[in-house]
Amino acid sequence: MGVRESLPRISATLLALLAVAAPLPFILPEYMITTLIMFFIWAVVAQSWNLVWGIAGVWTLGQMAIFAMAGYVTGWLILHLGLSPYLAAVLGIVGAVAASVVMALPSIRLRGVYVILMTISFHEIFRILLTTDTSGFTGGIFGLPPFEGFVSGDLGFGERTLIQYYIALAMLLVTAPIVWCILHSRLGLAFKAMGQNPLYAAARGISIFRTQVLAFIISGVLAGAAGAYWAQYFGTMQPAVLSYDTMVMVFAMMVVGGWASFSGPILGAFIMVWLSELLHATHELRELLLGLVIFVVSVTLPDGFAPKCARLLRLIREKAAPPRDAAARLPVRDR
Amino acid sequence: MNTAVSIVYTGFVLGSIFATSAVGLALMYGTLRFLNLAHGGFLIVGGYVAWLVADRLGVPFYLAMVIATVAGAGLGLLTYFSMLRPLLGVGSPRWDIATIMASVGLAIIIEAVILLVFGPRLKSLPPAIDGKIIVGTIVVQYNALFIGVLAVLILVVTHWFLKSSRSGIALRAVAENVQAAYLMGIPSGRVFASTVAIAGALATAAGVLLGSFYLLRPSGGLDPMMTAIVVVVFGGLGSIPGTIVAAYIIGMLQAAVSVFLGVKWASPVLFAFMILVLIVRPYGLYGRPEDVRV
């Protein structure tokens, strides 16, 4: 299905989602709204990670460094230069893309686990330089001092959360269709070809260099937007976003939801954010249960939840309206 | 002169610790293409089991090490049957991603269980060998030398086992092509199970050695695991001689950087060095180029 033919469907889906999500802050309790904001942020990050790892097949672990770079650049510009939050956010995204390209270039000749090593090296250098800095520029292990983001601090907490909710929602609802269109364009096809068989893709005239750098740039813009938003939302930036636990959490979103699919990372972010919220009630058993879920899901569903959900949806749709032609009546797995 | 000697000695000690951390990880990665991110958990289980029997029950250190090794083999078998066997044969990118993620889950489980059972307080193991001699201005601990020798010994024996022994050849055949090995009459399931058990045993044994250097804490496996991954991949796709050489190069480098630039720069310079090496030699020190080239 081409991008142009499916535009009506995309707009319809978007409007439906907007209609569901827009009144939520007036219905749900406040803690659920903040949880939803976290879901919007992580869905964008997981999506950006999946674009490079799942679709284009470049095993990067540098995504959290890109995310943090955007947040820190935003924070530095607001704190040290006094720029407006909007300009700072845009420049934060530029910083993230720069970091992304720096990681993309040396990993072009590498495959598989060597990319993991290369990107984790960048991540670790960034993390260590940030946390060991004592000049006060990065704030060291305590993070940046508080600053004012998009939303003025004069407003009450409830009002601020409301505005933040809509900005985060807009971020997800703008980036997701863009990613969908990229995935269904020629460029998306090149990403998939490179992910599945780079040698064959190169033989058929796809420039690995161009495709890989483009994948990193697009992914950097997405992760950068989420990172810049994160800094504005919390009004600070902490090195905790670069910790191993955070990286595992976001990586788990991509894998549990289903890597290499469009809806997987969003689904995974939804599952993991609510799961970790629900597990707070179990106190000291939280980590154990979280580990068990990750373990069981990745062993039993190596492709994640998304393909299962897609199949279920298709079965329901066919029950409701049986397709005309004979081929479509075959069981889903035989097609 | 003194500086040089102290760099060489510190580098040797660090290199030995890195080589020790990499034992087990190299074997699992070299044979099953399984990047075990629960390796840190394996290390720390070894330390805690040894602490339990040595400190609580008063068992001598060597016996404690044997018990920890047996526990590691058990943990390895558990990992194999619960996690690797259901995933065998799912194909290349899926296998890697699913095993990496599942082992992350396993690592979280191990850490949580240790925290629940032993609590967050630091524990310390007695050194494997007591005593030290003083050479010039540096203090040489026998424990450090012992660990270095033992780690290299374990790696050399593993290398010999993989290259020359009948079971080692069977193991590499299975790792290369499961179906072809099966047609040649190699019981691939049993070979995999025993590999994971041996690798688990080596990892916990290494954990006991590390535990006699550092204090034990539930999340203490993470840092040695990170360096172990760097060492194993830098050495070249689970090549055992590569792992040994890489461990000592990295150890010497860290020692030199700590002396000349300060401890703060040891890790950043190490990772910058890694990036440089990967740009120049994308397949590690001893890896085969055809494995990774696009």
Image (cartoon, coloured by chain):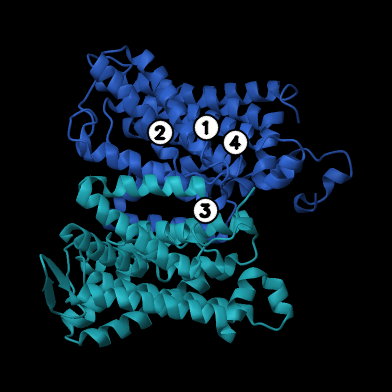
Looking at the picture, how far across and down is residue A298, in whole percent?
52, 57
Query: Label 3 marks which chain's residue?
Result: A
Query: Label 1 marks which chain's residue?
Result: A
**Where is mark 2, residue-wise?**
A67
The chain displayed cyan equals: B
Q: Relative to residue B206, is residue A1 depicted above or below?
A: above
Marks 1 and 3 on same chain: yes
- Dot 3, how many residues are within 10 Å of its Cα: few (below 14), some (14-19), or many (20+)? many
For marks 1 and 2, give the CA distance.
Answer: 10 Å
User: First in sequence: mark 1 or mark 3?
Assistant: 3
Looking at the picture, how far across and down is residue A19, in whole percent?
53, 22
User: First in sequence: mark 2 or mark 4?
Assistant: 2
Q: Is the Cβ of the residue at disc 2 closer than 8 Å to that at disc 4?
A: no
**Where is mark 1, residue-wise?**
A219
Q: Which amino acid does label 2 sit on?
A: Phe
Q: Which amino acid does label 3 sit on?
A: Val
**Where is mark 4, residue-wise?**
A212
